[in-house]
Image: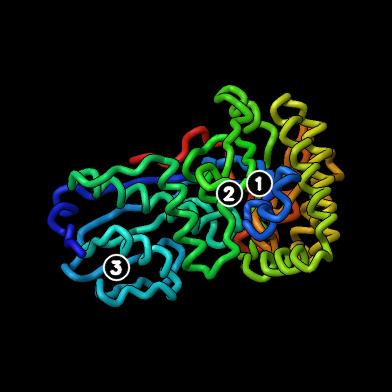
Amino acid sequence: MDSIRELLTRQPITFSAPCRVDAGGTWDIKSLALPLERKTPVTVNMALTLRTTVTLAPWEDGQVRISSRGFSHTETAHWERLPFDSPFGLFFAAVSYFGFHGLEVKIDSRSPVKSALGGSSTALVALLGALEELSKIRAEKRLSRKEILHLAYHLEDGISGGNCGIQDQAAAVYGGVHLWKWHFGRAHEPLTRIPLMDEAGQEALSKHILVAYSGKSHVAAHTNRKWVNDFLSGKTRSGWIKANASVRAFARAIRLKDWNQAALFLREEMALRKKMTPEALDDVTEKMVMVAENAGCGGRFAGAGAGGSVWALGEKANIHVLRRKWQEMLAPIKDAQILDVGVDAEGIRRE
């Protein structure tokens, strides 16, 4: 392990990456995608202009300190005993991979804490970008974006104990609006990235989406575990296959900027998700989805649901009506809010 305290005293390093909303998430988990690779498992995600920033600053030699806005505690540990099982364990593991100490990792996210927008994966990608920049300054091997994505996924999958997806990290690395094809059986090319829109199209899409935080933080583990277990048992497999077809159709509509069709297929996927795991919606998020659909939009919980955020897509006039309805609905709920977002064309970047 090498101390980089003096280097950071001269030059702190800051990187950022965007969070996301998605349709088709969970198909990016190997236990779903691999056995049914012949069905062409896909996910569509959209990077959002809610960026997570990670700054590397100097700290005591031999020590690594991690802090994050929105969390009341910080963690500091000696480099020989970095706790990979702590709340910040994933970030300690990333620092350990690069072999550094004498630094503080400061995380600052513009998205609400545990809002189901991929915050921890986004922070990890930004941290890896900053650590990789340190390696470059020290004339060590530089990582490509593809390699950062590979490393972020395997770190998170390993530290979490498996059944981790990769689409959160993919949106953070590349930004934009993409259709992702998952084919983990291919040793050298486990995924295919297909951009659905250029920057002009992404600007247009920004006027057709709405994202809101329900006021209740989410915990993804339970819902993800149920999705995987029910799929493996065969109980919900046919529903997942139908949902995958809906997401492919959603991607085609997005590419054509056919907002009504896109909303239709988003509603279709949401109905299938709700049938398979009704507990992914609580009272507030279920009502938010219903209000979105009544306004002529498609609505969907972000990530694994169970609280967190809901996003909607539709014609601009319908989105305008929905914004007012969601604002009225969320006003009495502590911390609930419409989020000021658009599509972020950039992925990971140095600030």
Image coordinates for residue 5, horizontal then vertical, percent: 16, 59
- Which badge, 3 or 2, comes first in the chain's sequence? 3
Vertical position of residue 273 compared to residue 16: above or below: below
Vertical position of residue 265 compared to residue 207: above or below: below
Residue highlighted by disc 2: 167
Image coordinates for residue 140, horizontal then vertical, percent: 22, 47
Q: Is residue 327 visible?
A: no
Of the two numbered discs 3 and 2 in the rendering, the one whose residue sits closer to the viewer: 2
Number of other residues with Cα within 10 Å of mark 1, as a class: few under 14, some 14 to 19, many 20 or more: many
Residue highlighted by disc 1: 22
C-beta proximity under 8 Å, tags 2 and 1: yes
- How far separated are the C-alphas under marks 3 and 1? 32 Å
Q: As drawn, is 82 to the left or to the right of 192?
A: left
Here the colouring is rainbow
Q: Residue at x 82, y 61 (%)?
A: 236
Residue type at the position of mark 1: Asp
Number of other residues with Cα within 10 Å of mark 3, as a class: few under 14, some 14 to 19, many 20 or more: many
Residue type at the position of mark 3: Arg
Residue highlighted by disc 3: 65
Of the two numbered discs 2 and 1 in the rendering, the one whose residue sits closer to the viewer: 2
Q: As drawn, is 16 to the left or to the right of 270?
A: left
The image quarter in which residue 351 lies: top left
Task: Label 3, secondary structure: give it.
Answer: strand
